[in-house]
Image (cartoon, rainbow, N blue to C red):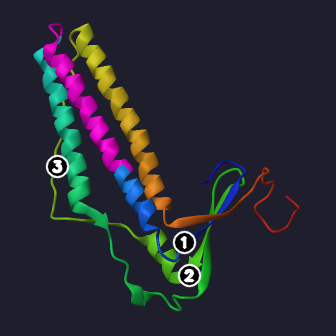
Amino acid sequence: MLEDGRYSVYRVRERAQRRAKRRVTFYKALWVGVTWLCFLVLLAILLLSDCTTWIRVTNCVALTTWSICLRMVENLFIRPAEVARGTVIRGDSPDAVYVLGRDNSAFVLEGTRQQIKEWSTRGLRYGPNLDIFHGVLSLRRTTMDQAAFVLLNVLGQVNLHVGRMLNSLDCLTPLERLDESKDSVICRTISMHC
């Protein structure tokens, strides 16, 4: 959205498209299933290999279990917080928010004052107090241990990037793109004397 030298204009839709929301939710669940399947395949290869030490198998089992636990905690205990409707004056009035980025980039969000408040200020609400501690020993003894560690990290990086993309898509689903600049923006100010 804030690509250098570009601007984008979005409008909060009156009603978030349920089909698009379900599609993003399905893709997120599918991605979780694929990553867990990859973890299980990697664990099976490690368990069937003669070159892997018990330390690496233990680490991979711990990391896989940790990933599954975090995903379950995220899906079961973390929800978007409710936004109080009464705190917005003239909530049905049109408004816009301008977010300036680097190198003359900008993001404009249009909608009613209530919609903009709901989209921009909603935080996360956590369930019961969750104390999660994680400690993983990363001793690498054999070549197979190192290969498994690298593969697990690669899978973790792919999971991070695809998860971030899917969460961004989920966040942008209620928005409708109105305009985007085709040319590089020279100046963000109204005056053309930059």
| 1 and 2 marks in contact (CB < 8 Å) | yes
Between the residue at mark 1 and the residue at mark 3, the CA separation in whole angstroms equals: 36 Å
Between the residue at mark 1 and the residue at mark 2, the CA separation in whole angstroms equals: 8 Å
Name the residue type under label 1.
Val
Name the residue type under label 3.
Ile
* Above or below: residue 141 compared with residue 124: above
The rendered magenta stretch, by its main secondary structure, is classed as: helix
Q: Residue at x 22, y 8 (%)?
A: 142
State the image quarter where residue 158 is shown.
top left
Q: Residue at x 62, y 75 (%)?
A: 96
| 3 and 2 marks in contact (CB < 8 Å) | no
Residue indicated by mark 1: 12
* Above or below: residue 72 compared with residue 171: above
What's the magenta region? 27-51
Q: Position of residue 179 (x, y in %)?
A: 70, 63
Residue indicated by mark 3: 132
Seen from the viewer's position, the closer of residues 13 and 97 is 13
Residue 138 belongs to the span the image colors magenta: no
For disc 2, the neighbor class at 10 Å (few under 14, some 14 to 19, many from 20) is many
Query: What residue occupies the far front of the structure in this picture?
Result: 19
Q: Which circle's residue, 1 or 2, is located before the other in the chain? A: 1
